[in-house]
Amino acid sequence: MKKSDVQILLVILGIAILVLGYLFGFKKEKEKLDTAEETNSTLRVQLAELQEKAKQKDQLLAETDEYNKLFEKELTKYPADLNQETAVAFLKGVEEQMEYNHVVVGFQRPAEFYILGQGAAEGASVVADDVDTSESYICTDSAYTISFEGSYEGIKQYLDYIANYKYFMNISNINVTRSYNEQTNDEIYQGNLTLNGYAVSGPDRTPEQPNVDVPNGVGNIFTGGGSITPQSTNKFDSDQGASIVSDHDLTIGLVKADNDTTKASVLVASDETKEETIVSYEGNDVATLDISVQEKDGKNYVTYMIGSNQYEAELLSKDLKILVASTARVDSEDLSGVKVNISNSTDVAVYIKVQGDDSTSPRFTLGTKTGSVTVY
């Protein structure tokens, strides 16, 4: 082979190596470029969505706040748990208010049936006094099977009471029969029904603690004779706190926002005649009122605060009596109310009397509490 032919072959081989290197390198870089372009395209779509949301920031925040208020309002329609003590106190209270008697009541263990934001629960039974420490709102229900008797008016009052009770309940089935006593000329209505109760447990939901004052046993355990005189658990149990209305240390006023008198939806004062003792809130939503009872230098003080506004007063009595003077809601747009958190680190007993609150959607709710606190 001539020397010139070898040189030509070497030149062709070099050109081939350059071409192949270029082709393979170009293909690899092209794949990287295509991948980067696909990623950029996805990011451009996300950026456009975020930019559109940024334009609606104020509207979205306002809608979120409104939905949170509506959610809190809905929560007030349900208790935080379904403990049997509260159920028994409720059923006993019904008998005391109307011509209606429970002959037999059957209780079921509460069961979870729904977790807000997650869907249906597995339906496992839950212990009534279990405390849910998760961030989920868990819905539970329980059915009470009841045999009853009463007058015609008593049955009507009972149905109306259930329909307008402060917490949502419903009667899933009912059977009623009428009988007539010719000797006494009395009509007696007997029957059975299933009463369903519902609860929502979760963050910042504190179960109500019922005031249980039921005498147990007899005077003589061997003969069964005699009786035990019931003792009142708390000093205001005898009148269910009615005397607090005329004699109290702190007043919480709850009305519709933008009312014609004070313009405040929540007004708290230890002395209504002194403006410096007044702490108020004007929003059409649920305000948070923090009340603290503590000892300083051998004296007891109460501090009440809404946001950054607060007032402190010395307690001159051995208990703290609070009157909550509320009003019924005007319409569905009336959302004003208060959630009261009480921290009591002293031996002072706190008594709260709630008067005039809305029966179906209360303005007053009790949040967290420590120490001795009783609500009537």
Image (cartoon, grey):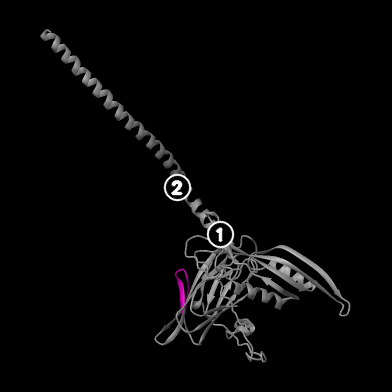
Nearest the eye: 263 or 269: 269
Mark 2 lies on residue: 54
Camera-side mark, 2 or 1: 1
Mark toward the start of the polypeptide (2 vs 1): 2
- Classify mark 2: helix, strand or loop: helix
Callout 1: few (<14), some (14-19), or many (20+) C-alpha neighbours within 10 Å?
A: few
Q: In this picture, which residue range is highlighted in magenta?
A: 303-312
- For the image, the number of numbered tags is 2
What amino acid does circle 1 point to? Phe
For residue 71, which numbered disc appears in the image? 1
Q: Quadrant of the C terminus?
A: bottom right
* Apparent side of residue 172 relative to residue 134 in the rendered image (left or right): right
Name the residue: 67% across, 74% down. Answer: 91
Residue at the limit of the structure toward the right, as seen here: 182
Residue at the limit of the structure toward the front, as seen here: 222
User: Where residue 52 appears, x then y in whole percent?
Assistant: 46, 44
Name the residue: 51% across, 80% down. Answer: 372
The image quadrant that residue 247 belongs to is bottom right
Nearest the eye: 249 or 98: 98
* Apparent side of residue 301 relative to residue 71 in the rendered image (left or right): left
The image quadrant that residue 331 belongs to is bottom right
Residue 54 vs 134, above or below: the answer is above
For residue 241, which numbered disc appears in the image? none
Name the residue: 73% across, 70% down. Answer: 147
Callout 2: few (<14), some (14-19), or many (20+) C-alpha neighbours within 10 Å?
A: few
Residue at the limit of the structure toward the top, as seen here: 2
Residue 274 vs 225, above or below: the answer is above
Q: Is residue 172 magenta?
A: no
